Image: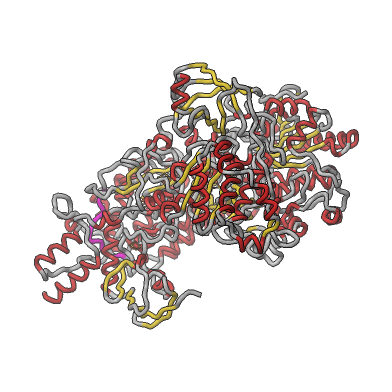
Amino acid sequence: MAKATKVIHRMEVSPEEKRRRDLEEIETRLLDNKDAVHELFDVLEQLQKREILQTVKSLFAKGDEVMDILVKTADSKETANSIKNLLLMLGTLGTLNVQQLEPLILKVNAGIARVAELDEKKEQQGYVTLLKSLNDPEVKRAMAVGAAFLKGLGINQDEYERTTQKPEHQKGHTDGEQFDDIFTKEYHTLQKENGTSRQASGDSGGSWLIPAGLLLAAIPISLLFKKKS
Amino acid sequence: MSEQINVTINGKPAVIDANLSAMQVLEDHQTEVPSVCYHPSLGAIETCDTCIVKVNGEFVRSCSTKLKSGDVIDGVSADVKEAQVIGMDRILKNHELYCTVCDYNNGTCEVHNTVKEMKVNHQSMPFEQKPYEIDDSNPFYRYDPDQCILCGRCVEACQDVQVTETLTIDWTLKKPRVIWDKNSKINESSCVSCGHCSTVCPCNAMMEKGMEGEAGFLTGIAKKTLRPMIELTKNVETGYGSILAISDMESAMREDRIKKTKTVCTYCGVGCSFDIWTKDRKILKVEPSVDAPANGISTCVKGKFGWDYVNSEERLTKPLIREGDAFREAEWEEALSLITSKFKESLEKKGPDSMAFISSSKCTNEESYVMQKLARAVIGTNNVDNCSRYCQTPATMGLFRTVGHGGDSGSITDIAKAGLVLIVGSNTDESHPVLATRVKRAHKLHGQRLIVSDIRRHEMADRADLFFQPKPGSDLVWLSAVTKYIVDQGWADQEFLNNRVNGIDEYIESIQKFTLEYAEEATGLSKDTLINIAEEIHQAKTTAVLWAMGVTQHSGGSDTSTAISNMLLITGNYGKPGAGSYPLRGHNNVQGASDFGSMPDRFPGYEKVADDEVRAKYEKAWNTKIPAEKGLNNHEMIDAIHEGKLNVMYLKGEDMGIVDSNINYVHEAFEKLDFFVVQDIFLSKTAEFADVVLPASPSLEKEGTFTNTERRVQRLYQALEPLGDSRPDWEIIQDIANRLGADWHYTHPSEIMAEAASLAPLYAGVTYERLEGYNSLQWPVAADGTDSPLLFLDEFPFPDGKARLFPVDWTKPLEFEKEYDIHVNNGRLLEHFHEGNMTYKSKGISSKTPKAFLEVSPELAAERGLEDGTLVRLTSPYGSVKVECLVTDRVKGKEVYLPMNDAGEGAINYLTSSQADKDTDTPAYKEISAKLEVLKAKGESPLPRINHRNGDPQPQMGVRVDKKWARKDYVFPGDLVKLRKEASKRG
Ligand code: SF4
Ligand code: SF4
Ligand code: SF4
Ligand code: FES
């Protein structure tokens, strides 16, 4: 006679047992990924030397706030302008050798990304966790992606030029007009007047390395904040 | 071969197929034409104007322009480009490019890609926000008017593919936008959350909520930060080029962490397949594709959004072993050795037939195969069955008798093609949603005729050209009467009968008693109606009959199915496109569960156990003896337990304790078992009776194949790791088999399929390679891989190749005492599946449809003082249920409708009897009468206001682009370019 029941007694694992199992798991992973572990330590050392770890740590602490301030500050007319000026300068000088920057950015990028992810898993902490994560094929992939990303910076962009209009050109298209659509307006004007000359405006822009860099940096940073938002 | 015509393409002569669009032809000749609103599954919508080219010197939209002989096509000149750019500029006025921080930036955004392809360098009109808020009221998707480019794809899909007819674009607004019903909130509209609109949207305007803040690296940042971020990117960037290049890189990085896995829906028998996007265990979205053979871009709410159950807290993650009146979690080792020792004990003491095995229509074909192999080869019993007994076996029987194959005659495309669709006892719109859309579309757009016979006025009934409500259980009578009338009128397909059918005279003799008068009396239908049906069938070029539980779950279910098939034979509606019989399969793998031998009398591929030759084949392959007598079916198993002859049961993935009829009787049986093993993903009602419960993995966590209602075998790939210690069913079964002394070495389901294919001729050519990705095969599959989308083209699978007319008589439905005056019908709801142990796990679905309810007619409501929310008790001679009422004219008189989607006090099967189809033992679920008492007169309506049934659809043909063109502020880009040219010549 088996009466229907919904009662389940869960299996209890003692804390010691759980610790033992976790350690065993980590040990196996470490051994399985000896090379990766060494590499990671190299990266960490580099980060440490350059005090990047410190920076990251404080960024962690502030999270969204920092991001918010960062972006908002950047989004002022002055900043936008100075960035643009910078762009122009860089464009003129044209001496920046991206290749040389590659190893640095690569490591920062991969390193930060990993650290960011680690923070997400609250229940695990400390060095052990860090080591554990190494097994992850994503470490390797992150590096590859980082490299692809940087290579992308070198692609040819001659064909791109400024496409959005300058604010002063944008005026006059808004409401209050008979035709909200400038093409329709043009059509009717042409029909009436026959022969107004038209010209396309557009000024060419230069490199876009800086915004690229900015966004590049924003990606790992954002990873830090995602969970908190 | 289609007709060929001569044209000139970009200055060069070419020979092309007639009937192609200019867009198609240009693309075939290496000329890319932008096409933002065009979608292969929706056709030319003509809203975007980016595809403009010149044909014979005139500007036209290439997507909608068919070419004629002698046409001169120009898809490359500066004029053409100029016109296309105007179209694109208008789109960009409606859409802000912030790709890097957009969740839709996954390489498939068509706005993004078109800007890139066209190398748009200069935008004449800046982006302008629209004066509308984002609508995120619906739990599954949201609409952002600011990003909406007004392409109308969503409207086309909702109006003419899904045919729920909720969406329109209001072209009269100063700033047009998409609206729901008459401009209500999404969640308060008639929207059924099928997801078509978000699937076809070319950008992020209509988007699945699972994607929000998840897909991109930068998209999860807080909203208040996002806006300045967008501004910053836009201010700093030096043109679209840079936005696109950066966002392309970011999108490439996404590839890396979003996993896209092809899978097959685990709910109904339509067998929709799609890619499921996951990030770790998070499900971002379901992405149907044009390549999906059964459904294309279509899904219903369950397949598109109903996956929460996979990550439910309630999933079983460890084996459970009973200890007195409770379970305790255990390790696999302990659970499996307990099972082995108990199985061995029963085997030794009481013999193999003291044990029984039940397979599930939720599991894969391979799992069904190993289950029956375990029963037959390892234990040595034919006591193996599956749940299709509950619904579909009578249909299979009816088809075996007449045409020889127990499956749909053709494909879903044949149903769409049919001149006349006759639906009998199937609530198709809710039970087989995507299949129903094909009928609704053909009916709305292509003049397909639709006849519906049902006791309940469901959506298909509302749409039908002819709808009638026969007395419950009397379908066989009107079918036979109509057939007789057709014969009497001389409308039978004589040639077909002479060449391809046996038993004509005897059959015609047998239907003589079904005169119009007799039928009128038995069915309550008027003679005019009956004649009307006959005429419709006679006039239709082809007829396809769709039927389901309304037919099969009766005492005479097999006979009625036979009568349908007889009628189709008489009218020659077999073996040609757009015709045939379609017994719509309920579960995702109902078809496959039986196909792969989980039946007491049949091996895989329906070969008979009693057939010595067949048995010898299996005995040789499995190196064992197999009993020749057929085993017990589900129902007989329950009886055998009560009689003490059956003591051990192993059941997987099947909530028999809810879905079987007369469940009180079933529950008592479970209590009597010596040892009961249940394998499931949840602690189902059935599992509550078990001695050992094994945690299984659902479809997303394993590989395998499912077979849908079209006999189509499709592969599913593993998207997630099994949760906790749960495991795929086939692995568990193999372990048990091996512990009992079998020597199985399957390392992958493909090996199981290979074995099944080598033994069952029906699948001779089925291999995993041939099923790669979205490829599929419809059985029978010949050894060389040729499959059979349409059956009976040349012959019927009988020795002489001819079909058989099979005389049947009417079995009157069960009669109840006078006091049981309410007829209780039951069936499905669109948004829930069966007892709901998967769909109720979806917060979104539960918020819109929290519980089952009883549909009562306005007449009954008036008579008994019922209103929305009145709590009533229904009592049949077998048990009772408590449920709240909903007053609706979908039902009439004293007929009520109780959806089967409840596992608690509202579970329909507390009412049902053990009465069953006389030929197959399928429970006669549809033959219930009960008495009704009011328990509490007033209460809240069980159907929340936000349920789609309270909406107000706005049918129209597509997006009505003509209304856009008629706007004052619209001019055709071609006209403007022409005028500019003239002007510049003059000036
Ligand atoms: S019913 Fe709803 S989800 Fe489906 S296409 Fe229409 S609006 Fe979209
Ligand atoms: S919401 Fe509809 S109209 Fe708007 S862009 Fe998407 S598919 Fe086109
Ligand atoms: S439940 Fe049926 S119709 Fe809905 S998505 Fe799944 S297979 Fe398709
Ligand atoms: S693709 Fe032809 S008008 Fe949009």
Percent of width and height locating residue B339: 80, 36
| Left or right relative to A120: residue B785 | right
Confirm whether the magenta stretch covers residue B123: yes
Question: At x 63% / y 51%, what residue is drawn?
Answer: B565
| Left or right relative to B624: residue A58 | left
Q: Is residue B94 above or below residue B865?
A: below
Residue B496 sits in quarter: bottom right
Q: Is residue B372 above or below residue B442?
A: above
Q: Nearer the viewer, residue A92 or A190?
A: A190
Q: Is residue B792 above or below residue A16?
A: below
Q: Nearer the viewer, residue B952 or B260?
A: B952
Percent of width and height locating residue A181: 20, 57
Q: Residue furthest right?
A: B349
Q: Residue furthest left?
A: A193
Split into 4 quadrants, where in the image is the C terminus of chain B?
bottom left
Question: At x 90% / y 36%, what residue is drawn?
Answer: B348
Principal SS element in the magenta part? loop
Confirm whether the magenta stretch covers residue B69: no
Q: Nearer the viewer, residue B728 or B416?
A: B416
Range shown magenta: B120-129
Percent of width and height locating residue B582: 59, 50
